[in-house]
Image (spheres, rainbow, N blue to C red):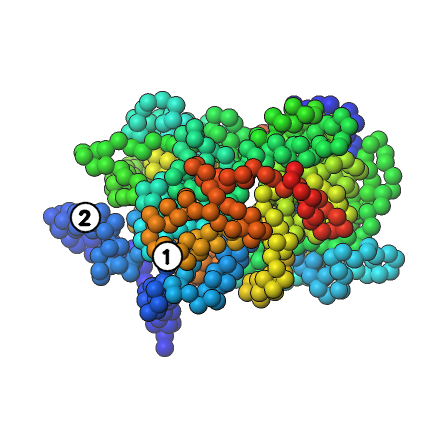
């Protein structure tokens, strides 16, 4: 099977630095122009029936890409199966919801709090949970995701099942207003966050934490033997993943202006995980592609209405069987190593 | 906190918890058998269970032509109806288990180590099963007629030993120990255990791996189908979304006892059933899941491989 | 053909299917002038039952309208929000920006409504909900209400809660009430407005919240029995109520079982087993469709939808759709026109009742909540609760 990722990498390596940076700039510009694609003739086929194309771009697409990248740090880079990632998203969203309605702080001021609380909960959950191996971690994180939702459902301060109403929208940045029926600004904000996460992940990957995660992912025992402090590096990956989820949650709450516990179900965790695996576990570009497709597809096929989710399931099943390593798999040499270890 | 309920209802809660626990045990075997052999979480099992509940209704209403409001049956006709529905549901789920393995796992297994791809593929299969059932049933709950007249053996210490409660517990024990003997004593059972210890070596020993895996899924489906029958007989109603909650509870059961460990699942299920009843009664039903997961985390912290541990190779399926 | 080409062909044809079909659909508009109404409710996912039931009513009302060969054809844009706020937040801006749509039947769920309101308000699309009962949606003092576009043809919890408490305890000497909700926005909302009245006219023996889709109610039954309550009020939906009432009766509880409009559907006595549901006291602003529709309508309805027993909120959805259709018959073709027509107009419901909306969107005189009971496995209307 063709490995697009390797082909892309070899072309990339043959380019000169100016060519690389201009390519990156062109791609970022094109992506930033995506909100206009729905109204622009040749690309209007992207438009989603019934739901708003621009709104779809923000949630689910951009936010799923962001969460996918965050979860990729946990699942893809360090091999920890997290089935409750939505919990961090929820914590970010509720931080925004509660602080936004009770204090006079605005979205940008609450953002650090949202990230902080998500990281803190990641740390508190990770300290006991990350001592567990493989599938036990999966069920504990799954449970944590459910606990966060149920607690939000049962507490007064979170509004119970009614949720938090009237969450303020962000104040304008550089004169760019955040309007109700115009979602471009939200898209750009999340795009910037995505770029930051990509930059951060790439820095980590080539440095000590990245190497430690890689070692943990391939074989915990060997990694421990080589002097990698398992718990510390697992916690790092877990809390950084949580931070990304929390940041996404803050922006999300600020955009929908209303949050309720049923927005943060197990399904969302599963969907984000599906994005990561579907796109290519451990590969940033794969995750971005996977999340874009899986978030976009159900909206694009809205005209099938009744059988929409069924078609989605079938597509997921077929692609997973045809390309088990995802659409854009991680580098070949990493896979070869993996085989040797196993 | 509501402790007053314990005065009069303590034994009743225990009994109901055990009965519920046995349904969990039977479903959890679908997880634990597969996990024992493949080291994979069989996420589609909850939807296999859901299909089983509908299979039971189909057997009773569609095939045996009992009306929804018909009178309860007696004597031979009752036993025949119940047994037929049980076997029908078990077989449907058993073959569905094999189908799930073929569609979701077989190809990915042949390509080698791909745990997460199989996980997503199994989830995709469960989406397909769920949505198909939803469309077929118009999203409506389906009712199974009360064929079994729910008379009681009597009350002991406030616990009502009703026929369906007793039936679930007795049949649960019988099915479980039949399976346990099958796995430890028969040739096929030994093959399953051999594969769970080492795929490579069992291949060398001439075991047909694909057949053993299919057999595992079939057995897991059989017990899940039995659970579906008991569930439908006790609660008499089912809906397309019935799988998620029960599947989650069954999965928790498997993990509590030590996933991959048959006997662990047995005690895990009973423990979970009783725990759920008391958590709902004392703290309120809305805190049930939170209690369950908190206990699960505590158990795993003390015993990282579940109460009975999965490391005990001999008891493993 | 080698496998690679086959595979890419499959991908291309799938893509063509996905992108092609919808490109065709807008072009299908015929020479007749066509006006679009939107319908927003959960049609997939775990809340699908409510939306699918309601959709049958909207389709039925529309088929009746189109059968009269009017000059203006009306078509339905069906939007599935899965009953979830996050999906509604994506769907709503899309419908809001589709200027061909001049009215929206729905949203079905209160949470989804709450999340949809900003987009609809910004574009002035009139809404008539058939089942969103949350009080704050039409509450003058709520931080975010639906004024001016939101209307509803269903009684909100503020009216139904007290009526439910009154009706449940009617004729019971020293009533002692056990209140159970299902922890959904609907159930909890109704329970919150039922509780004060219960405290006034009876003793509250206890309360519990059993999350939706729970299978086993035996622990709640144990608590009900331990508390010695003689009235159980359940705030939730029919499938769960059926399981609950069955568990209560099997557990030996002999008192009153009462519930709100979420339970009032013809399938309830059937799902509960006829004897368990017998005598249950139900309230609703929504009358069972088969009780108010003519025999000919029922035949046509079954023929169109394939459903013999209509589900919940079918009558209210039918009424909501007909309000829009009445306005269209009067020549309304724009959103502002529709807004004026719906706000100022007076309409006939299928039961012969008059529907007019107050300033904040509730039916004037809609406070009357119907009392029902189950007799011989059939829901029977008793009068005003």
Residue C331 image label = 1
Query: Where does the image place residue B54, in percent across and percent down from the top left?
Result: 65, 57
Chain designation of label 2 = A
Closer to the camera in the image, B78 or C184? C184
> Is A303 placed above or below A82 here?
below
Give the structural element (helix, strand or loop) at label 1: loop
Query: Where does the image place residue A100, in percent across and percent down from the top left?
Result: 36, 27
Query: Where does the image place residue C45, in percent across and percent down from the top left?
Result: 51, 51
Which image quarter: residue A205?
A: top left
| Left or right of residue A82: residue B257 | right
> Is B208 placed above or below C353 here?
below
Seen at 74% across and 57% down, the residue is: B68
Which image quarter: residue B53?
A: bottom right
Chain designation of label 1 = C
Seen at 18% across and 34% down, the residue is: A174
User: Label 2 vs label 1: CA separation?
Assistant: 47 Å
Closer to the camera in the image, A278 or A3? A278
Residue A29 image label = 2
Give the structural element (helix, strand or loop) at label 2: helix
């Amino acid at each position: 099977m063709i490995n697009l990722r390797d082909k892309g990498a070899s072309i990339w390596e043959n380019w000169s630095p100016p060519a690389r940076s201009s390519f990156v700039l062109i791609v970022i510009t094109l992506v930033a122009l995506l909100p206009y694609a729905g109204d622009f003739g040749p690309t209007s086929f992207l438009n989603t029936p019934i739901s708003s194309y621009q709104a779809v771009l923000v949630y689910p697409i951009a936010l799923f890409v962001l969460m996918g990248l965050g979860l990729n740090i946990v699942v893809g880079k360090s091999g920890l199966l997290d089935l409750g990632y939505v919990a961090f998203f929820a914590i970010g969203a509720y931080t925004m919801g509660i602080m936004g309605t009770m204090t006079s702080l605005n979205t940008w001021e609450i953002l650090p709090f949202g990230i902080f609380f998500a990281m803190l909960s990641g740390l508190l959950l990770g300290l006991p949970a990350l001592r567990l191996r493989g599938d036990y971690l999966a069920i504990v994180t799954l449970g944590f995701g459910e606990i966060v939702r149920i607690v939000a459902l049962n507490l007064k301060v979170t509004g119970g099942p009614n949720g938090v109403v009237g969450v303020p929208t962000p104040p304008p940045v550089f004169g760019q207003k955040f309007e109700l029926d115009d979602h471009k600004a939200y898209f750009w904000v999340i795009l910037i966050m995505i770029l930051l996460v990509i930059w951060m992940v790439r820095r980590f990957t080539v440095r000590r934490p990245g190497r430690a995660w890689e070692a943990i992912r391939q074989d915990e025992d060997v990694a421990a033997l080589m002097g990698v402090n398992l718990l510390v590096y697992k916690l790092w990956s877990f809390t950084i993943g949580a931070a990304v989820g929390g940041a996404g949650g803050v922006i999300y709450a600020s955009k929908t202006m209303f949050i309720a516990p049923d927005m943060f179900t197990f399904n969302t965790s599963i969907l984000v995980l599906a994005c990561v695996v579907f796109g290519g576990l451990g590969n940033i570009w794969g995750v971005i592609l996977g999340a874009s497709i899986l978030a976009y597809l159900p909206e694009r096929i809205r005209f099938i209405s009744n059988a929409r989710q069924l078609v989605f399931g079938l597509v997921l099943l077929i692609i997973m069987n045809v390309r088990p390593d995802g659409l854009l798999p991680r580098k070949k040499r990493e896979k070869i190593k993996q085989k040797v270890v196993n | 906190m509501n402790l007053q309920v314990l005065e009069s209802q303590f034994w009743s809660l225990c009994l109901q918890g055990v009965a519920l626990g046995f349904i969990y045990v039977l479903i959890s075997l679908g997880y634990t058998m597969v996990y024992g052999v493949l080291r994979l979480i069989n996420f589609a099992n909850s939807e296999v269970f859901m299909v089983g509940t509908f299979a039971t209704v189909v057997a009773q209403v569609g095939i045996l032509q009992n009306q929804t409001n018909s009178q309860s049956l007696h004597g031979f006709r009752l036993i025949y109806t119940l047994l037929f529905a049980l076997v029908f549901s078990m077989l449907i789920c058993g073959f569905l288990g094999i189908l799930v393995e073929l569609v979701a796992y077989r190809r990915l297994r042949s390509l080698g180590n791909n745990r997460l791809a199989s996980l997503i593929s199994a989830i995709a299969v469960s989406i397909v099963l769920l949505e198909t059932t939803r469309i077929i049933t118009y999203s409506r709950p389906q009712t199974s007629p009360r064929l079994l007249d729910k008379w009681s053996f009597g009350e002991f210490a406030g616990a009502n030993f009703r026929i369906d409660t007793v039936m679930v517990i007795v049949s649960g024990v019988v099915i479980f120990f039949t399976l346990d003997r099958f796995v430890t004593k028969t040739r096929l059972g030994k093959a399953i255990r051999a594969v769970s210890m080492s795929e490579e070596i069992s291949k060398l020993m001439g075991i047909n791996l694909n057949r053993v895996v299919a057999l595992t899924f079939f057995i897991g489906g059989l017990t899940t189908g039995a659970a579906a029958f008991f569930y439908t007989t006790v609660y008499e109603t089912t809906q397309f979304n019935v799988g998620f909650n029960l599947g989650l509870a069954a999965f928790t059961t498997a993990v509590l006892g030590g996933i991959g460990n048959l006997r662990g699942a047995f005690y895990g299920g009973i423990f979970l059933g009783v725990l759920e009843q008391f958590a709902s009664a004392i703290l309120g039903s809305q805190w049930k899941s939170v209690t369950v997961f908190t206990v699960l985390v505590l158990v795993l912290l003390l015993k990282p491989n579940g109460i009975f541990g999965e490391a005990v190779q001999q008891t493993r399926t | 053909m080698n496998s690679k080409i086959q595979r890419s062909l499959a991908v291309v044809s799938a893509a063509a299917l996905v992108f092609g079909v919808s490109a065709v659909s807008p072009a299908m508009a015929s020479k007749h002038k066509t006006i679009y109404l939107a319908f927003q409710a959960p049609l997939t996912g775990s809340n699908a039952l409510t939306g699918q039931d309601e959709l049958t009513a909207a389709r039925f009302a529309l088929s009746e309208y189109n059968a009269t060969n009017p000059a203006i054809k009306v078509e339905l844009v069906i939007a599935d929000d899965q009953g979830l706020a996050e999906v509604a937040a994506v769907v709503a801006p899309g419908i809001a920006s589709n200027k061909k749509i001049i009215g929206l039947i729905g949203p079905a769920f209160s949470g989804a409504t709450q999340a949809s309101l900003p987009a609809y308000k910004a574009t002035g699309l009139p809404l008539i909900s058939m089942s969103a009962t949350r009080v704050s949606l039409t509450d003058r003092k709520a931080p975010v209400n639906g004024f001016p576009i939101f209307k509803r043809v269903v009684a909100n919890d503020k009216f139904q809660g007290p009526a439910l408490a009154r009706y449940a305890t009617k004729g019971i000497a020293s009533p002692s009430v056990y209140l159970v909700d299902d922890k959904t926005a609907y159930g909890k909302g109704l329970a919150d407005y039922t509780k004060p009245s219960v405290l006034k006219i009876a003793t509250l023996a206890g309360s519990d919240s059993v999350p939706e889709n729970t299978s086993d109610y035996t622990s709640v039954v144990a608590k009900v029995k331990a508390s010695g309550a003689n009235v159980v009020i359940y705030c939730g939906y029919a499938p769960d109520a059926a399981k609950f009432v069955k568990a209560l009766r099997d557990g030996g509880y002999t008192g009153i079982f009462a519930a709100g409009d979420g339970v009032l559907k013809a399938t309830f006595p059937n799902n509960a087993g006829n004897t368990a549901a017998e005598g249950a006291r139900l309230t609703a602003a929504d009358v069972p469709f088969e009780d108010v529709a003519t025999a000919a309508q029922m035949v046509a309805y079954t023929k169109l939808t394939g459903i013999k027993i209509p589900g919940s909120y079918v009558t209210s959805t039918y009424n909501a759709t007909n309000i829009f259709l009445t306005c269209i018959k009067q020549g309304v073709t724009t959103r502002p026109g529709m807004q004026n027509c719906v706000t100022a107009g007076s309409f006939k419901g299928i039961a012969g009742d008059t529907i007019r909306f107050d300033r904040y969107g509730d039916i004037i005189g809609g406070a009357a909540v119907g009392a029902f009971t189950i007799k011989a496995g059939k829901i029977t209307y008793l009068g005003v609760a």
